[in-house]
Amino acid sequence: MPVREEMRGNVLVITLDRPEARNALDGVTMECLRERFELLAAQRPIPAGDPAELATAPVGTEPDDWRPHVVLLRAEGTLFCAGADLDEMRRLGAADFQENLAAALAMGAMFRAIRNCPAPVIARVQGPAYGGGVGLVCACDVVVASQEATFTFSEVRLGLVPGVIAPLVIDRIGQAATRAGFLTAEPMRAVDAFRIGLIDRLSDADGLDAAVDRTVVALLKGGPGALGRAKSLIDGSVTLGFDRSSEFTGKMIAEARTSREAQVALSAFLAREPAPWTQAAEWSQPEDGSE
């Protein structure tokens, strides 16, 4: 399979596993990613409770199971993702408009499934990303990258446009930086990507896994339900704008305050104890090539 996954504690690690094809996004890879992230959206957050309850919380593949606390998206090999698969692009070049539209919408559905995942998604970027691979990065919540990473929107040099990834890229780095990236198609160094907000946490190559660890641990300290609510809060606030968001934001905090998760966390805080879910936060990263 082009996508490998495994649970590491309460962290779901999803790995692009086509290094021989530069981890390009072919139809099978995109379908695997879309289906997995859509399933995550149907799952419930891990419930607040005592450590024993959390330790036995099942995280499976059925919609009624509890979803992971955090998702880590990574790639095998030295290149993160080469974007759309060239063989499929060549085939679609000979197809009609309707087939091309269907393929574009299918790719867009994959990006949206990642973007809308209620669990926080971390991108671990160890090397170059091109076109749709940069879109994959922009669909994630927190991007941790090595100085070895580069980011290139190469579409215009192939007579194409970065169609379905455009909203994700603009949302992350703004219109001006997107214009420069899309039109020049010049590779962007990691330090420049960090400066404009494409990367959230930048490390040297040897420190990438340690930076990912710190990010995962920070997220595992948040309530599983609160993390999903915080993502919805941001999206809703942006959509509504300041003037129209008062009722929405008030409802969000009211729902959070009355949740069992918040009540359990507050009781733990007053007792000077950690929130119960932090005691089930043990995790470790997989090694390259692991199953």
Image (spheres, rainbow, N blue to C red):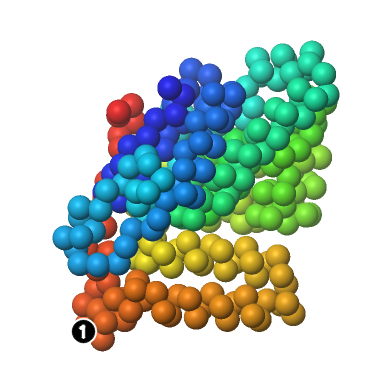
Q: Secondary structure at mark 1?
A: loop
As rendered, which of 147 and 124 lies closer to the eye? 124
Res 279 visible = yes
The structure residue drawn at horizontal position 41% and vertical position 79%, both measured from the top left corner, is 258
Q: Quadrant of the C terminus?
A: top left
The three-letter amino acid code for the residue at tag 1 is Ala
Q: Quadrant of the N terminus?
A: top left
**139 relative position to 242: left or right:** left
Q: As drawn, which residue projects farthest toward the front?
A: 64
- Write down the residue under mark 1: 271
The structure residue drawn at horizontal position 30% and vertical position 29%, both measured from the top left corner, is 290
**212 relative position to 279: left or right:** right
Q: Residues within 10 Å of mark 1 (few under 14, many from 20)?
A: few
Picture coordinates of residue 275, whole percent (x, y):
27, 72
Res 201 visible = no
Give the answer, above or below, for where 203 lies relative to 248: above
Q: As drawn, which residue projects farthest toward the bottom?
A: 270
Give the answer, above or below, for where 77 lies relative to 220: above
As rendered, which of 61 and 109 lies closer to the eye? 61
The structure residue drawn at horizontal position 74% and vertical position 80%, both measured from the top left corner, is 243
Picture coordinates of residue 250, whole percent (x, y):
58, 81
The structure residue drawn at horizontal position 37% and vertical position 35%, both measured from the top left corner, is 5
Q: As drawn, which residue projects farthest toward the left?
A: 52
Exactly how many numbered labels are in the figure?
1
Give the answer, above or below, for where 54 lies relative to 149: below
**168 relative position to 36: left or right:** right
Picture coordinates of residue 237, whole percent (x, y):
65, 70
Find residue 88 and report its image quarter.
Answer: top right
As rendered, which of 273 and 290 lies closer to the eye? 273
**200 relative position to 269: left or right:** right
Picture coordinates of residue 79, whole percent (x, y):
51, 30
Find residue 95 and report its image quarter.
Answer: top right
